[in-house]
Every structure is written in C-alpha cells, then in structure tokens.
Image (tube, rainbow, N blue to C red):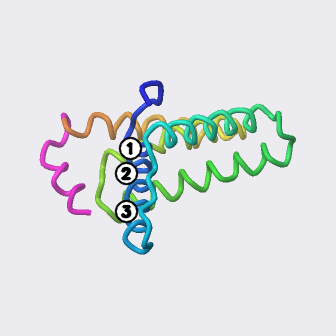
Amino acid sequence: MDNIEYNFLKEQVIDDLFHYQEVIDSLSSMPIELPKTVLSRVLSAYQKFVEEARQGEHGKTAQFYLINIQLVNYYITLSRSIRMGDFEMFKYPIPKITNLFFTVNQPNYARWCVKYLDNLYKVYETHPGLKNDFMKG
C-alpha cells in the first residue's frame, strides 16, 4: 500500500473497510480475514478502473457517470464538512468545484471561487479567533 497516496478521505475509506470487516466477523460464526495485500490489490484495481473510465476507455456512459459521481461526492464532502465542523475537509472540494466552473465556462464563479479559497487559506493569519468558530460549526 506504499504507492497509494494518503489523504484523509482514503484513510477513512480504509478504516471503514476494516471496521466493516470487524462487524462481519462479529456477526458470523467463522471469522473472515481481509489481509492488507488483498485490500491493496482491490484498491489498486479500483483506482485503475476509475482512471480508465475517466479517460473514456469503458465508453462515454461510464465516463459520464464517473464525472457525475465525482461531482456528487464533492457536494457530499462539502455538506459533511459543514455538519461536522471540519474546516480542513471544507477546504478540500473547493478547488475541485472551481475547476468545474472553469470547465463549463463560468469565469465569474471560477474567479470568485479562487478568491474565496485564497481567503480560506489565509483565515488563520487574518482572523486568528475565527478558527474556533469554524470548529464549532
């Protein structure tokens, strides 16, 4: 698993897979073992499939649905970060959404999104007490 880029989302997915394995083990009479090598192969194969679908190798329909799923995932991440009060997670999907605005020829939204993101990155310097308010939700 050394070649997988770690960030909070992927670590959470891996932790969730291990948690589900523990739940399945507790419900079944025979324990099921999911070694890290198997998990690594599954995640690598999925990552390869996603990249192929993004490039259109599995057809336009798969490419469309992959893009749609990614956009919904950005929205869910943004919504979840607001509900959890996780400021770092809140900043994660903003650049992705900004790229979408550039792609669909919405330059005003894109420019303001870039400015908003810049303000978010500087919020600790410009408003030191605001971090606590963000963490509270």
- Would residue 132 be found to the left or right of residue 102 on screen? left
Tell us which disc is closer to us: 3 or 1.
3
Q: Are marks 1 and 2 in contact (CB under 8 Å)?
A: yes
Give the structural element (helix, strand or loop) at label 2: helix
Please tell me which residue is depicted at 46% across the width and 54% down the height of the picture: 77
Reading the image, the residue beneath label 3 is 22
Q: Residue at x 72, y 36 (%)?
A: 54
Q: Which mark is residue 11?
A: 1
In this rendering, the count of numbered labels is: 3
- 13 vs 46, left or right, is left
Classify 10 Å Cα crowding around label 1: few (below 14), some (14-19), many (20 and above): few
**In the image shown, does 75 or 66 lie closer to the viewer?**
66
Q: Nearer the viewer, mark 3 or mark 2?
A: 3
Q: Is residue 14 left or right of residue 128?
A: right
In the picture, which quadrant includes the N terminus? top left
- Res. 16 image quadrant: bottom left
- Tell me whether circle 3 and circle 1 mark residues in contact (CB < 8 Å): no
Tell me residue 86's x, y (percent). Answer: 30, 53
* Mark 3 neighbour density, 10 Å: few (under 14) some (14–19) many (20 or more): some
Mark 3 and mark 2 lie on one chain; the one further toward the N terminus is 2
Residue 99: give x, y in percent of width and height: 60, 36
Residue that numbered label 2 is attached to: 15
* Viewport quadrant of the C terminus: bottom left
